[in-house]
Image (cartoon, rainbow, N blue to C red):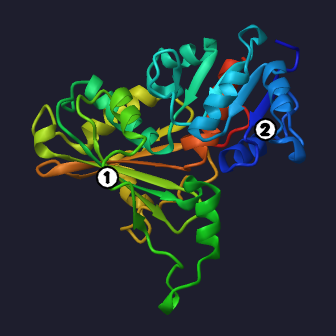
Amino acid sequence: MSQRPSIYIDGQEGTTGLRIRDLLGTRTDIDVRLIAEDMRKDMETRRRLLNEVDLAILCLPDDAAAAALDLIEPESGTRVIDTSTARRVAPDWVYGIPELSPEQRQAIRTADRVANCGCYPVGFILAVRPLIEAGLLRADVQLTVNAASGYSGGGRKMIEAYQAATPRPQGDAPRPLSLYGLGGNHKHVAEMQRFSGTLKPPLFVPSVDHAYCGMLTSTPVPFAAWSAPGTTAQQVYDVWQTRYAEEPFVQPVSPADATGLLRDGQFLDLDGAALTNRLDLFVFGDPQVGLVLIGREDNLGKGASGNAVQCLNLMLGFDEATGLTV
Protein backbone atom coordinates (compact mmCIF):
# COMPACT_ATOMS: atom_id res chain seq x y z
CA MET A 1 0.00 0.00 0.00
CA SER A 2 1.32 3.47 -0.86
CA GLN A 3 2.27 6.00 1.81
CA ARG A 4 -1.04 7.80 1.28
CA PRO A 5 -3.61 5.11 0.45
CA SER A 6 -5.64 5.63 -2.70
CA ILE A 7 -9.43 5.25 -2.84
CA TYR A 8 -11.77 5.00 -5.81
CA ILE A 9 -15.54 5.31 -5.39
CA ASP A 10 -17.26 3.46 -8.24
CA GLY A 11 -20.69 5.05 -8.31
CA GLN A 12 -19.58 8.40 -6.94
CA GLU A 13 -22.73 10.23 -8.10
CA GLY A 14 -25.24 8.00 -6.31
CA THR A 15 -26.70 8.88 -2.91
CA THR A 16 -24.34 6.63 -0.95
CA GLY A 17 -21.34 7.60 -3.05
CA LEU A 18 -22.01 11.31 -2.68
CA ARG A 19 -22.16 11.07 1.11
CA ILE A 20 -18.91 9.06 1.13
CA ARG A 21 -17.28 11.73 -1.04
CA ASP A 22 -18.43 14.38 1.43
CA LEU A 23 -17.03 12.41 4.38
CA LEU A 24 -13.68 11.87 2.66
CA GLY A 25 -13.51 15.22 0.90
CA THR A 26 -11.50 17.17 3.48
CA ARG A 27 -9.10 14.40 4.48
CA THR A 28 -5.42 14.77 3.69
CA ASP A 29 -4.40 11.27 4.80
CA ILE A 30 -5.90 9.55 1.74
CA ASP A 31 -5.89 10.08 -2.01
CA VAL A 32 -9.44 9.97 -3.39
CA ARG A 33 -9.46 9.30 -7.13
CA LEU A 34 -12.50 10.63 -8.99
CA ILE A 35 -13.56 9.72 -12.49
CA ALA A 36 -14.46 12.51 -14.91
CA GLU A 37 -18.18 12.79 -15.54
CA ASP A 38 -17.87 12.06 -19.25
CA MET A 39 -15.86 8.91 -18.50
CA ARG A 40 -18.14 7.36 -15.88
CA LYS A 41 -19.36 4.69 -18.31
CA ASP A 42 -16.02 4.14 -19.99
CA MET A 43 -15.14 0.57 -19.12
CA GLU A 44 -11.39 0.85 -19.62
CA THR A 45 -11.09 3.97 -17.46
CA ARG A 46 -13.06 2.29 -14.70
CA ARG A 47 -10.95 -0.86 -15.06
CA ARG A 48 -7.77 1.17 -14.70
CA LEU A 49 -8.99 2.99 -11.60
CA LEU A 50 -10.32 -0.18 -9.97
CA ASN A 51 -6.96 -1.90 -10.41
CA GLU A 52 -4.59 0.92 -9.49
CA VAL A 53 -6.03 1.93 -6.10
CA ASP A 54 -5.51 0.41 -2.69
CA LEU A 55 -9.25 0.26 -1.93
CA ALA A 56 -12.37 0.53 -4.09
CA ILE A 57 -15.80 1.33 -2.70
CA LEU A 58 -18.61 0.05 -4.90
CA CYS A 59 -21.73 2.24 -4.62
CA LEU A 60 -23.67 0.46 -7.33
CA PRO A 61 -26.79 -1.70 -7.78
CA ASP A 62 -26.24 -5.43 -7.32
CA ASP A 63 -25.64 -6.38 -10.96
CA ALA A 64 -23.43 -3.38 -11.65
CA ALA A 65 -21.37 -4.12 -8.53
CA ALA A 66 -20.88 -7.70 -9.73
CA ALA A 67 -19.70 -6.38 -13.10
CA ALA A 68 -17.26 -4.03 -11.36
CA LEU A 69 -15.82 -6.93 -9.36
CA ASP A 70 -15.19 -8.76 -12.62
CA LEU A 71 -13.03 -5.82 -13.74
CA ILE A 72 -10.68 -6.16 -10.76
CA GLU A 73 -7.69 -8.36 -11.54
CA PRO A 74 -6.63 -10.70 -8.71
CA GLU A 75 -3.00 -9.60 -8.91
CA SER A 76 -3.91 -5.90 -8.47
CA GLY A 77 -4.30 -6.28 -4.71
CA THR A 78 -7.26 -3.89 -4.70
CA ARG A 79 -9.38 -4.33 -1.59
CA VAL A 80 -13.12 -3.75 -1.84
CA ILE A 81 -16.03 -2.44 0.20
CA ASP A 82 -19.27 -3.30 -1.59
CA THR A 83 -22.34 -1.33 -0.51
CA SER A 84 -24.75 -3.38 -2.65
CA THR A 85 -27.02 -6.11 -1.33
CA ALA A 86 -25.86 -9.26 -3.05
CA ARG A 87 -22.78 -10.28 -1.03
CA ARG A 88 -23.82 -9.54 2.54
CA VAL A 89 -24.36 -13.17 3.47
CA ALA A 90 -21.73 -14.61 1.10
CA PRO A 91 -19.29 -16.88 2.97
CA ASP A 92 -16.19 -15.38 1.33
CA TRP A 93 -17.08 -11.80 2.29
CA VAL A 94 -16.76 -10.16 5.72
CA TYR A 95 -19.94 -8.48 6.92
CA GLY A 96 -19.26 -4.82 7.56
CA ILE A 97 -20.60 -3.99 11.01
CA PRO A 98 -17.57 -3.48 13.30
CA GLU A 99 -19.73 -3.70 16.42
CA LEU A 100 -21.25 -7.07 15.48
CA SER A 101 -18.96 -9.02 17.83
CA PRO A 102 -15.62 -8.59 19.56
CA GLU A 103 -14.00 -10.45 16.65
CA GLN A 104 -15.67 -8.56 13.80
CA ARG A 105 -13.52 -5.44 13.97
CA GLN A 106 -10.33 -7.44 13.44
CA ALA A 107 -11.97 -9.45 10.65
CA ILE A 108 -12.75 -6.18 8.83
CA ARG A 109 -9.22 -4.84 9.39
CA THR A 110 -7.66 -7.79 7.60
CA ALA A 111 -10.33 -8.44 4.95
CA ASP A 112 -9.88 -8.00 1.23
CA ARG A 113 -13.63 -8.06 0.62
CA VAL A 114 -16.11 -6.34 2.94
CA ALA A 115 -19.87 -6.27 2.32
CA ASN A 116 -21.19 -3.06 3.87
CA CYS A 117 -24.35 -3.54 5.95
CA GLY A 118 -27.85 -2.57 4.90
CA CYS A 119 -29.42 0.45 6.58
CA TYR A 120 -32.42 -1.21 8.25
CA PRO A 121 -30.53 -4.23 9.62
CA VAL A 122 -28.12 -2.16 11.77
CA GLY A 123 -30.68 -1.09 14.38
CA PHE A 124 -32.27 -4.53 14.51
CA ILE A 125 -29.09 -6.61 14.61
CA LEU A 126 -27.25 -4.53 17.18
CA ALA A 127 -30.35 -4.37 19.41
CA VAL A 128 -31.21 -8.09 19.27
CA ARG A 129 -27.93 -9.98 18.97
CA PRO A 130 -26.44 -9.20 22.42
CA LEU A 131 -29.76 -10.04 24.09
CA ILE A 132 -29.83 -13.48 22.45
CA GLU A 133 -26.16 -14.07 23.24
CA ALA A 134 -26.78 -13.13 26.88
CA GLY A 135 -29.67 -15.63 27.09
CA LEU A 136 -32.19 -12.87 27.79
CA LEU A 137 -34.11 -13.14 24.52
CA ARG A 138 -35.21 -16.44 22.98
CA ALA A 139 -33.68 -17.14 19.58
CA ASP A 140 -36.57 -19.34 18.41
CA VAL A 141 -39.28 -16.65 18.44
CA GLN A 142 -40.16 -14.91 15.18
CA LEU A 143 -39.73 -11.20 15.71
CA THR A 144 -41.46 -8.34 13.93
CA VAL A 145 -39.55 -5.28 12.77
CA ASN A 146 -41.43 -2.07 12.00
CA ALA A 147 -39.14 0.50 10.43
CA ALA A 148 -39.24 3.95 8.86
CA SER A 149 -36.55 5.60 6.76
CA GLY A 150 -35.92 8.99 5.25
CA TYR A 151 -36.55 9.02 1.52
CA SER A 152 -32.85 9.33 0.64
CA GLY A 153 -32.61 5.58 1.28
CA GLY A 154 -34.61 4.95 -1.90
CA GLY A 155 -31.99 6.43 -4.21
CA ARG A 156 -32.10 9.21 -6.76
CA LYS A 157 -35.52 8.44 -8.29
CA MET A 158 -37.24 8.40 -4.90
CA ILE A 159 -35.44 11.57 -3.83
CA GLU A 160 -36.56 13.37 -6.99
CA ALA A 161 -40.15 12.14 -6.55
CA TYR A 162 -40.37 13.29 -2.94
CA GLN A 163 -38.73 16.64 -3.58
CA ALA A 164 -40.97 17.32 -6.57
CA ALA A 165 -44.20 16.32 -4.81
CA THR A 166 -46.91 18.96 -4.52
CA PRO A 167 -47.99 19.84 -0.95
CA ARG A 168 -51.26 18.26 0.12
CA PRO A 169 -54.25 20.17 1.56
CA GLN A 170 -54.17 21.51 5.13
CA GLY A 171 -50.41 22.02 4.91
CA ASP A 172 -49.54 18.34 5.33
CA ALA A 173 -46.30 16.90 3.96
CA PRO A 174 -46.43 16.36 0.15
CA ARG A 175 -46.38 12.61 0.69
CA PRO A 176 -47.45 10.76 3.85
CA LEU A 177 -45.52 7.92 5.45
CA SER A 178 -45.88 4.94 3.15
CA LEU A 179 -45.41 1.21 3.71
CA TYR A 180 -43.60 -0.85 1.09
CA GLY A 181 -41.93 -4.25 0.65
CA LEU A 182 -45.16 -5.90 1.73
CA GLY A 183 -44.49 -9.15 -0.12
CA GLY A 184 -42.34 -10.42 2.74
CA ASN A 185 -39.20 -10.91 0.66
CA HIS A 186 -37.33 -7.68 1.34
CA LYS A 187 -33.65 -7.84 0.41
CA HIS A 188 -32.51 -7.07 3.99
CA VAL A 189 -34.22 -10.03 5.67
CA ALA A 190 -31.42 -12.53 4.97
CA GLU A 191 -28.75 -10.47 6.72
CA MET A 192 -31.15 -9.53 9.53
CA GLN A 193 -31.62 -13.20 10.36
CA ARG A 194 -28.03 -14.32 9.74
CA PHE A 195 -26.32 -11.75 11.91
CA SER A 196 -28.89 -11.16 14.67
CA GLY A 197 -28.74 -14.76 15.92
CA THR A 198 -32.47 -15.37 15.45
CA LEU A 199 -33.48 -18.81 14.21
CA LYS A 200 -36.40 -17.50 12.15
CA PRO A 201 -36.49 -14.67 9.62
CA PRO A 202 -38.12 -11.58 11.09
CA LEU A 203 -41.41 -10.28 9.78
CA PHE A 204 -40.15 -7.01 8.35
CA VAL A 205 -42.42 -4.03 7.57
CA PRO A 206 -40.44 -1.06 6.18
CA SER A 207 -41.81 2.38 5.39
CA VAL A 208 -40.57 5.66 3.98
CA ASP A 209 -41.21 9.04 5.57
CA HIS A 210 -41.19 12.52 4.12
CA ALA A 211 -37.82 13.41 5.67
CA TYR A 212 -34.55 13.39 3.74
CA CYS A 213 -32.58 11.25 6.16
CA GLY A 214 -33.04 9.42 9.43
CA MET A 215 -34.28 5.99 10.46
CA LEU A 216 -36.16 4.20 13.22
CA THR A 217 -36.30 0.42 13.56
CA SER A 218 -38.67 -0.83 16.23
CA THR A 219 -38.89 -4.45 17.35
CA PRO A 220 -41.78 -5.23 19.72
CA VAL A 221 -40.87 -8.21 21.87
CA PRO A 222 -43.89 -9.82 23.60
CA PHE A 223 -43.82 -11.12 27.17
CA ALA A 224 -43.45 -14.76 26.08
CA ALA A 225 -40.38 -14.10 23.91
CA TRP A 226 -38.14 -13.38 26.88
CA SER A 227 -36.30 -16.28 28.51
CA ALA A 228 -37.24 -14.93 31.92
CA PRO A 229 -40.87 -13.74 32.24
CA GLY A 230 -41.08 -10.12 33.30
CA THR A 231 -37.75 -9.05 31.80
CA THR A 232 -37.43 -5.32 32.38
CA ALA A 233 -36.18 -2.43 30.26
CA GLN A 234 -33.35 -1.94 32.75
CA GLN A 235 -32.16 -5.52 32.21
CA VAL A 236 -32.11 -4.96 28.45
CA TYR A 237 -30.21 -1.72 28.87
CA ASP A 238 -27.69 -3.36 31.19
CA VAL A 239 -26.87 -5.99 28.54
CA TRP A 240 -26.48 -3.31 25.87
CA GLN A 241 -24.37 -1.12 28.11
CA THR A 242 -22.05 -4.00 28.95
CA ARG A 243 -21.69 -4.94 25.30
CA TYR A 244 -21.30 -1.45 23.82
CA ALA A 245 -19.60 0.48 26.63
CA GLU A 246 -16.42 0.94 24.59
CA GLU A 247 -18.09 1.45 21.21
CA PRO A 248 -17.84 5.04 19.94
CA PHE A 249 -20.84 4.85 17.60
CA VAL A 250 -23.39 2.76 19.52
CA GLN A 251 -25.10 4.61 22.36
CA PRO A 252 -27.63 2.75 24.52
CA VAL A 253 -30.00 5.15 26.28
CA SER A 254 -30.97 4.25 29.83
CA PRO A 255 -34.70 3.84 30.55
CA ALA A 256 -34.39 6.61 33.14
CA ASP A 257 -33.23 9.06 30.45
CA ALA A 258 -35.22 7.85 27.46
CA THR A 259 -38.54 9.57 28.24
CA GLY A 260 -36.76 12.90 28.56
CA LEU A 261 -35.57 12.57 24.96
CA LEU A 262 -39.09 12.26 23.57
CA ARG A 263 -40.46 15.35 21.89
CA ASP A 264 -43.37 16.68 23.96
CA GLY A 265 -42.80 13.67 26.20
CA GLN A 266 -44.36 11.41 23.55
CA PHE A 267 -42.62 11.34 20.17
CA LEU A 268 -39.31 9.74 19.23
CA ASP A 269 -38.30 11.61 16.10
CA LEU A 270 -36.84 9.78 13.12
CA ASP A 271 -34.09 12.33 12.43
CA GLY A 272 -32.56 12.52 15.91
CA ALA A 273 -29.25 11.03 14.72
CA ALA A 274 -29.21 12.65 11.27
CA LEU A 275 -25.82 13.54 9.78
CA THR A 276 -23.97 11.37 12.30
CA ASN A 277 -22.53 7.86 12.31
CA ARG A 278 -24.31 7.10 15.59
CA LEU A 279 -26.81 4.41 16.47
CA ASP A 280 -29.02 5.19 19.48
CA LEU A 281 -30.63 2.21 21.22
CA PHE A 282 -33.82 2.67 23.24
CA VAL A 283 -36.06 0.26 25.12
CA PHE A 284 -39.61 1.11 26.22
CA GLY A 285 -42.62 -0.84 27.46
CA ASP A 286 -44.29 -2.73 30.29
CA PRO A 287 -42.48 -5.93 31.32
CA GLN A 288 -45.82 -7.61 32.00
CA VAL A 289 -46.89 -7.04 28.40
CA GLY A 290 -43.69 -6.70 26.39
CA LEU A 291 -40.88 -4.36 25.48
CA VAL A 292 -40.05 -2.43 22.32
CA LEU A 293 -36.43 -2.29 21.15
CA ILE A 294 -35.66 0.76 19.02
CA GLY A 295 -32.65 1.73 16.97
CA ARG A 296 -32.27 5.27 15.63
CA GLU A 297 -29.66 6.25 13.06
CA ASP A 298 -29.04 8.20 9.88
CA ASN A 299 -29.88 5.83 7.04
CA LEU A 300 -26.96 7.31 5.07
CA GLY A 301 -24.71 7.42 8.14
CA LYS A 302 -24.42 4.30 10.26
CA GLY A 303 -26.79 2.66 7.80
CA ALA A 304 -24.64 3.18 4.69
CA SER A 305 -21.96 5.75 3.87
CA GLY A 306 -20.74 6.49 7.38
CA ASN A 307 -20.43 2.81 8.21
CA ALA A 308 -18.51 2.26 4.95
CA VAL A 309 -16.03 4.97 5.95
CA GLN A 310 -15.73 3.37 9.40
CA CYS A 311 -14.82 0.08 7.68
CA LEU A 312 -12.43 1.91 5.34
CA ASN A 313 -10.65 3.41 8.33
CA LEU A 314 -10.19 -0.01 9.89
CA MET A 315 -8.98 -1.59 6.65
CA LEU A 316 -6.39 1.16 6.04
CA GLY A 317 -5.09 1.36 9.60
CA PHE A 318 -6.67 4.65 10.67
CA ASP A 319 -8.59 5.31 13.85
CA GLU A 320 -12.07 4.13 12.92
CA ALA A 321 -13.70 7.40 13.94
CA THR A 322 -11.60 9.51 11.56
CA GLY A 323 -13.82 11.88 9.60
CA LEU A 324 -17.01 10.72 11.31
CA THR A 325 -19.40 12.48 13.68
CA VAL A 326 -20.88 10.85 16.76
Q: Residue 114 in the image: x percent, y percent?
A: 59, 23
Q: Please name the amino acid that badge 1 sits on.
A: Gly
Using the rendered view, name the quadrant where residue 73 is placed. top right
Q: Residue 47 in the image: x percent, y percent?
A: 80, 26
Using the rendered view, name the quadrant where residue 249 is placed. top right
Q: Is residue 271 left or right of residue 200?
A: right
Between 66 and 304, the one nearer to me in the picture:
66
Q: In the rendered view, tell whether residue 317 sits above or below residue 209.
A: above
Q: Provide the residue designation for mark 1.
A: 183
Q: In this rendering, does residue 310 appear at all?
A: no
Q: Residue drawn at (40%, 32%), measured in percent from left and top?
A: 191
Q: Residue 271 in the image: x percent, y percent?
A: 53, 59
Q: Earlier in the sequence, mark 1 or mark 2?
A: 2
Q: Residue drawn at (64%, 75%), measured in percent from left and top?
A: 164
Q: Provide the residue designation for mark 2.
A: 24
Q: Quadrant of the N terminus?
A: top right
Evaluate if marks 1 and 2 touch, with contact meaning CB atoms under 8 Å apart.
Answer: no
**Secondary structure under the numbered disc 2 in the rendered image:** helix
Q: Please name the amino acid that badge 2 sits on.
A: Leu
Q: Residue at the far top: name it.
A: 75
Q: In this rendering, does residue 100 appear at all?
A: yes
Q: In the rendered view, tell whether residue 203 sits above or below residue 46.
A: below
Q: Residue 54 in the image: x percent, y percent?
A: 78, 19
Mark number, residue 40: none
Q: Quadrant of the C terminus?
A: top right
State which mark lies toward you, 1 or 2. 1
Q: Are there few (<14), some (14-19), or many (20+) residues within 10 Å of tag 1?
A: few
